[in-house]
Image (cartoon, rainbow, N blue to C red):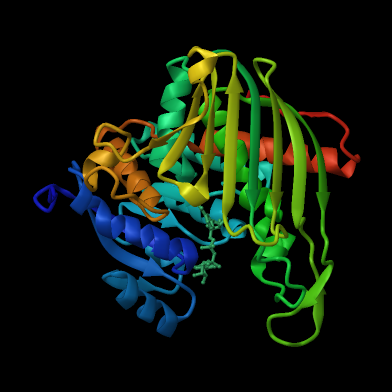
Amino acid sequence: MPNSSTSPTLGVGMVGYAFMGAAHSQGWRSVGRAFDLPLSPVMAAVCGRDQAKVDAAADRLGWSATETDWRALITRDDVQLVDICSPGDSHAEIAIAALEAGKHVLCEKPLANTVAEAEAMVAAAEAARERGQIAMVGFNYRRVPALALARELVARGRIGALRHVRAVYLQDWGADPELKLVWRLRKELAGSGALGDLGAHVVDLAQHLTGELITGVSAYTETFVKERPLPDGSGVGQVTVDDAALFTGRLASGALASFEVSRFATGRKNALRIELNGSDGSLAFDLERLNELEFYDNTQPATEGGFRRILVTEPDHPFLEGWWPPGHGLGYEHTFAHQARDLVHAIAAGTQPAPSFADGLQVQRVLAAIEESAEKNAVHTPVQAAE
Ligand SMILES: NC(=O)c1ccc[n+]([C@@H]2O[C@H](COP(=O)([O-])OP(=O)(O)OC[C@H]3O[C@@H](n4cnc5c(N)ncnc54)[C@H](O)[C@@H]3O)[C@@H](O)[C@H]2O)c1
C-alpha cells in the first residue's frame, strides 16, 4: 500500500471524540496507508471538555495532544484543518471561528441547527475561500462505493429519465421509553430529531444521486414518547424533537420522491435504503448490505430482465483502488477514509470539494420546509431557493 509519509503534512485538530470522533479518527489513521495523498495527515490534537476523558480518548484513538477548549484547538500552529465532530449546537460557532482563524474546516452533518446558522457558515466559508481555505460538510454516505457508482450510472444516463426516488432511513434505538433524554432528543442541542439526524442524509443522497434539487415538500412528524428520564436521574424532561418524519417531495425535473425516517422502526438498526426508478431502469441500495448495488436495465429484453446485484468491490469501482482484492468487502468506517482522501486532495489542489457548506445549507432549507409543512399538517411547502 502507498505510504505518504514523505509528503508535506496537514495537521488535523478534532473536536469531539465519541461516535463520530472515533469514526473520523479511523478515517485519519487509515487514509494515508490506503491512498496516495499529496499531503500527509497528522493527528495533531483532539478536543473534549474533560481533561481525563480527552486524554484517554487521545490514547485510544491516536491523537498526539489534547485540548479542553475548542478555542485553544483552533489557534494551534500545528493544526491546519479543524474537524468538527460535536453536536449541532456547536457547529456554527466553531466552524466560523476556525475559518476566521485561517483553518480549513470539515464539519459533521447536519451543517447547523437552523437555516440562519447555516447561512452564516456559508458566508464565513465563502470569505475563507478567497483566502484559499476549504470547508466541507460530512455527508459520508456519498462516499459508500456502491452509492458513488449509483451516481455515476445516473449521470451516464443508465436509468434514463428519472421518475421516482424512494428513500427510508430507519433505526430503532428510540423505541425504549426508558432511554434517557440524551442530547439528540433536545431541540436546543440537536436542532431536530430523526429529521436532522437521519432525514438530512436521505435528503442529501436523493439530491446527490439524481443531480436534482427538491423544490417542495409535504410532511408529517411525530414525537411518540414525549417525556424521558433525565440523564442525571433527577426526574423526567420533555422530548423537544421529532421521533419520526414522513415526507414527500418534488424534484426539479418533476420526478416524485418519498421519504420516511424513524428511530422507532423496531428491528431496523441502520436501514438506509434508497431506490431510483427511471424510464430506462432502476437502482436500489441498502446500507445494511453496503457492498452491493441492485441495477435493473429496462433496455434489455423482458425475457432476460430482472434486478441484478453488482458486487461493488472491483478495482475500477469508486474508491476501491486503495483497498482489497475483489469480493473482500468494505464497511461503514471506510466512508470516513474516503471523505478524508477527497478533502486532502482538495486542500492540496485549492479546489472546492463536495459537499460544500452551500450544499449543507441547501439541505438545511429542505429540513426547514419539512418542519414548516409538518406544523401545518402536511401543507405543501416550497423549499427556499439559493439566492
Ligand atoms: N455522518 C454520520 O453518519 C453521522 C453519524 C452520527 C452522528 N453524526 C453527526 O456528528 C455530530 C456528533 O454526533 P456523535 O454521534 O458523534 O455524538 P456523540 O454524543 O457520540 O459525541 C459528541 C462529542 O462531542 C463532544 N462535545 C460536545 N460539546 C462539545 C464542546 N463544546 N467542545 C468539545 N467537545 C464537545 C462530546 O464530549 C462528545 O465527545 C452530530 O452533528 C451528528 O449529527 C454524523
Q: Is residue 379 above or below residue 232?
A: above
The correct choice, above or below, for 241 with respect to 297 in the image is below
Return the x and y of residue 80 as percentages of the image width and height.
Answer: 30, 52
Q: Establish if 208 lies above or below 98.
A: above
25 over 275 or under it: above or below? below
Location of residue 37 in the rendering, given as x and y in whole percent from the top left corner:
20, 43
- Name the one closer to the observer, 359 or 115: 359
Q: What residue appears at the point 51 percent right and 21 percent down from the top-left corner?
A: 305
Q: Quadrant of residue 91?
A: bottom right
Front-most of residues 72 and 21: 21
In this view, the residue farthest toward the left is 6
In the visual, does 145 lie left or right of 177?
A: left
Residue 212 in percent (x, y) is at 58, 22
Q: Position of residue 202 (x, y in %)?
A: 60, 41
Q: Does residue 240 show up?
A: yes
Please tell me which residue is depicted at 77% across the width and 87% down the height of the picture.
Answer: 234
Q: Residue placed farthest to the bottom in the image?
A: 233
Farthest residue, direction front = 303
Residue positioned 13% across, 47% down in the render: 2
